[in-house]
Structures are given as C-alpha cells and as structure tokens.
Image (cartoon, grey):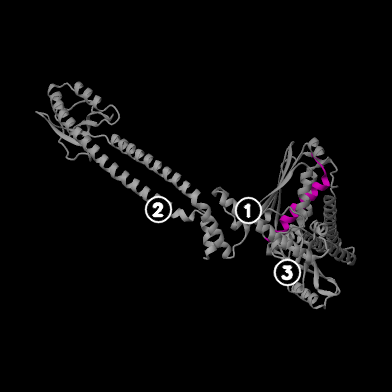
Amino acid sequence: MTKSQTSRHRRRFLLRGESAIAGIGLVICVVLVAAMAGASWWATTMHTRELSAERQRQAVKTADVLATATRSAMIAGDLEPLKRTIGVLSVGRGAPVVRVSLGDGKPLIAGDGAATASEVPHVFPRVVEGAPEGAVQRIVDIPGRGQLVLSVMPSTEAVGNAAWSLQLGLGAAGVAGLAALLLVYRRLRARVGAMGAIQEALLEAAAGEDHPENLRVNERLGDAARAWNSLVSDREQLRERILGERASEALGSRTGRRGGLQDACDAMWQGFVVIDEQMRVKYANGAAAVFLQTPRDKLHGADFGALVRNDQLSEVLAGVADGSVKQRRTVEVEREGDGVLRISVRPVRRDDAGVALVMIEDVTQQRVAEQARHAFVAQATHELRTPLTNIRLYVEQAQDLTEEQAAERAKCLNVINQEARRLERVVSDMLSVSEIEAGSLKLQIGEVRLDALFPELEDDYRAQAQAKDVTLRFELPPKLPVIRGDRDKLAVVLHNLIGNALKYTPAGGEVTVRVEADERRLCVHVQDNGIGISDGDAERIFDRFYRARDKRISHITGSGLGLAIAKEIAVLHGGDISVQSVLNQGSTFTVTVPSVADGAVRLAA
C-alpha cells in the first residue's frame, strides 16, 4: 500500500492534522481505561468477599438462636411463635431464607413460601445428610421424637446490589476522567492540528495526489487552515483557466451544437450505434444500451463483436472495415432467453469505409407471430386435406357400386356425411378464430334441446370410436331440459372435447360423457383414460395455437384451436371449462354453462 493510500485510509477515522497527537491521546485513554477496569475488579472483589463473610456470620448466629427456639417449640408442642419468628426474619430485601425440615427434606416450617406439612408426625424420619451450598445447617434433637433440620441461607441479593453500586460509582469516575481527557485533547488539537494537517497535505501533493479535495484541510482548525484552503482554491482556478485557454485553441471557432441531435437519437426506439474500423463503439444511444444489456457509460470503446457474438455479424463488420461491404447488410441474432434482434449494418460514408452505422431492433414478437401463423396454416391445410381426400375416395367408391350393393353405398354416404361435418367444423374453427381476434364473436340465443343434441353427438362419434377400438359411453339423466343458448356453438364445444378425448385415448381405452342438467345449469364431464396432460401443459392448453410438448402426440394432427374456441364460447355463455388430468392416467374436462335464459342473453350481450 502506498503512502498516499495509507493517508486516505487514516482520514476515514481522523481529521487531517490529528495524527500528530492522536497516538498520545490513544495511549492515555488505554492506560486510563485499564486502570479503571483493574480498580473496579479489585474493589468489587474485596467488597463482595467482606460483605459475604458478614452475611455468613449473621446466618450462623441466626441458626444458633433458631435451633434453640425450635427445640423449645417442639417440646412445648406450640409451633405458632416459631412460625411467626421465622416469618419476620424472612421478610424484606436481603433477608435470609429460613427453613425447618423433616429428615427426608420435606419442609415443616418455611419462610420462603414453600409448601409445609399439614401435620407434624410424632416420630421424625431419619435425617439425610447434605445441606445446600452456602447454607448454614443445624441438626435439632427433639427428645423422644427424632431430629429436625434447620437451614439458614444468606441472601445474595444485597451482596450483588452492593457490588453493582460500587461498579457504577467507579464507572462514573472513569467517564468523568475520559471527559476531562477529551477536553484536554481538543485544546491541544486546536493548537497544533492546523500545522499537522498542512504537513500531511504537502506530503500528498509531493506523492502526486494533488487533487484539490486531497489538499484542503478542515477550516475548524483555525486561521492557518483557512489561509491554506484559500491558497489551494487560487491554485485550482489558475489551473482551470490554463486548461480552458488550451481547449479554446484546440477547438477554434467550433461550437457544441450536437445536443439536439443527441437528444433525438436517445428518443429513438431502435438501437443506434456507431463503430470504428477496429469494431470499437464510438457512440450508442439509450435503446442500444438496453438491447445490448450493457450500461451506457461502459459502451464507449467496447468491442462490438464481444457484445453480440455472431459469426455472420462479425463477417459483415469485417467487410465494412476493409471496404468490401458498401451496402446495408441485415443479420438476425437469436439470443438465448432474450428473443431475436435484427441488426442492420452499413458504411457511414464513402471516404471512410471503416466507420459503420449499426441499427438494432427487437423482432421477437414478429417471429413468434410468424411461427404461430405458419403452424396454423400448416395444421389447417392438413385438417382440410384429410376430410376432402376421404370424401373424394368414398365418392369414387360409391360411383363404382351397382344397384345391388345398396348397403355398401349407404356406408359410403355415411362416411361422406361424417367427413363433410368434420370439414364444416374445421372451417367453423377458422372462422371462430377470426371472430375472436376481431372481437366480433357473438351468440345466436335460442332454445337448445339437449335430448336431441347428445344423441346426435353419439351418432357422430360412434364410428370413430369403433375404428379406434375405444369404448364410448354417454351417461345421460332420464330427462334432459331445454336450455337457452347458441345451439351450434355449444355443439362446437362438445365436439372439440369429445373429439380430443377420442383422439388422445389409445386403443382399448374408454371415453365417458356424463351429463348433469337442471333448471339452473348444464354440466358436462368428458372423461378418458388416455395419455393425460402434464402440469406445465395444463396451464396453457386453452391458449390459441398451443399444443402439448408430448412426443407421443407429434404424429396426431391438430391446430391448437379447439380448446381455445371452446373456452371462449363457454365464457360467452356465462360458464367456463376446467380440466383435471394425471399424466399417463387420463383427463377430465368439465364444461359448465347456465340454463337460465336471462343470464345467457345478458352475458352474450
């Protein structure tokens, strides 16, 4: 550690100039404190010993007197005078604790409030040897009855109070001594402190620490300190004047008019960076500091290639530096956990190709939207192609059938009808998504006959369940009411839930549709024992375009729209959809909508 650093550390604790006398004051304080501590310990110890001995002598006298009184009271058979005597002796601060006990230690008469014997036995138990530490004990012989134990325990409270009072007095004397020493120290510092402070300042200036703040001293040290600070201020003003004259000569007549341009650059939402031929940052606005995740004051002079590590970007910057790149180039950089940045690079001017202008934009949301749109188009295309292909194949098969093959032709027409309905549902999902995004999805409220709706659903999915070897059961109540709602959109909800249950239940599985309906609400439970849904996916399955990240469903087609549309329709009806699922065990989707017409109409509006 250098001499100047040592001086700075010392000034954290001492005023400048105090180092000359601080050592002497510290030694005196240590000696005074040590002397007071030793005196306090010695006086307290001696006084405590003397007071304890006196208390012990008084306890011996008390025990001798009470032993005689106890023997007399027991012979006379009247213990009341003895109890009163012991009670009087045990009252008050510092009073001894007196107790007359049987031989087995059970209290007979106690002055400390302990429970005493209700009856005095005629023959006393045998005395067990041993007395409490510090207690004075006497064995009292009672003719014809045995022995009693009298113990007198001197109080230690008075001893402790006396010791504390003595220590308090000695401490007060020590504080007074330290206060007097402080007054002497302050008088001495006022006389020699200024000269010591000026000496330390001169030593720091000689060591190169000539900053004005390092040279100034505390003006409370007197007139000499104030005169020294005035000289330091005059020196600093002269230095600033010289530096100003040199700057004026270097700048000539140029004026700083770049403040408005800099404010405009800071107002931009794109990152704006200027780099030199060494790929060092010469300027960066506030947005660039945010995108590059680096404080702005640390960007100047930083290596831009180290801030954004990308091989293609480094190649473009190298081309700008050597002049081979003369047009704007754009590179998109994916940063882990931070999205996608679009970085555009172009030379600033033709005669200085090494200087480049870099524009930075955050295009993360655009990329997410594009990926979702591409996934939707791909899934929708597949969803449309499959029913169209099946319709075309069964139409061709029906055309080749003869009049005698009416059963086969009916089967073909049935498949064509199912695929046409499937195609209709896919198109309806797409239209519903458009209406949801535009905020124009509305309900056409009317009567919904549940006793007709659920049999249609069972007919629609019976063939699909048989083809997959999945047991499909509808558990319906004896009587289904007529509710108010949008029949077509409620059918879309149930189609999506039942279709998903069949789609994700393997062969040999089971799908159960259980309906609970009354005059207040309709509750439909769609339960399967399929592959189930993980906790992470269950939180997002109602988001548009989202599909579970399960490798087992990668070959199963789906647009990621069905559950989102079903949720939206249920909410428009004033209801909701919930899911309970255990991975590899199955799922239960529950849709609940009110049956009351007024509530449905009001919520739809």
- Residue depth check, mark 2 versus mark 1: number of the one nearer the observer: 1
Q: Residues within 10 Å of mark 3 (few under 14, many from 20)?
A: many
Q: Secondary structure at mark 2?
A: helix
In the depicted structure, whether residue 244 falls above or below residue 450? below
Which image quadrant is residue 86 in?
Answer: top left
- Residue depth check, mark 3 versus mark 1: number of the one nearer the observer: 1
Which image quadrant is residue 448 in?
Answer: top right
Q: Which residues are magenta?
A: 483-507
x and y percentages locating residue 88 in the rendered image: 24, 24
Q: Is residue 429 visible?
A: yes
Residue 304 numbered tag: 3
Residue beneath disc 1: 230
Q: CA distance from mark 3 to mark 1?
A: 48 Å
Amino acid type at circle 2 is Val
Q: Residues within 10 Å of mark 2 (few under 14, many from 20)?
A: few
Residue beneath disc 2: 27
Q: CA distance from mark 3 to mark 2?
A: 59 Å
Left/right of residue 83 with respect to residue 339 in the rendered view: left
- Residue depth check, mark 3 versus mark 2: number of the one nearer the observer: 2
Is 498 covered by the magenta stretch?
yes
Mark 3 or mark 1, which has the lower sequence index?
1
In the depicted structure, whether residue 388 falls above or below residue 39? below
Left/right of residue 601 with respect to residue 63 in the rendered view: right
x and y percentages locating residue 605 in the rendered image: 83, 40
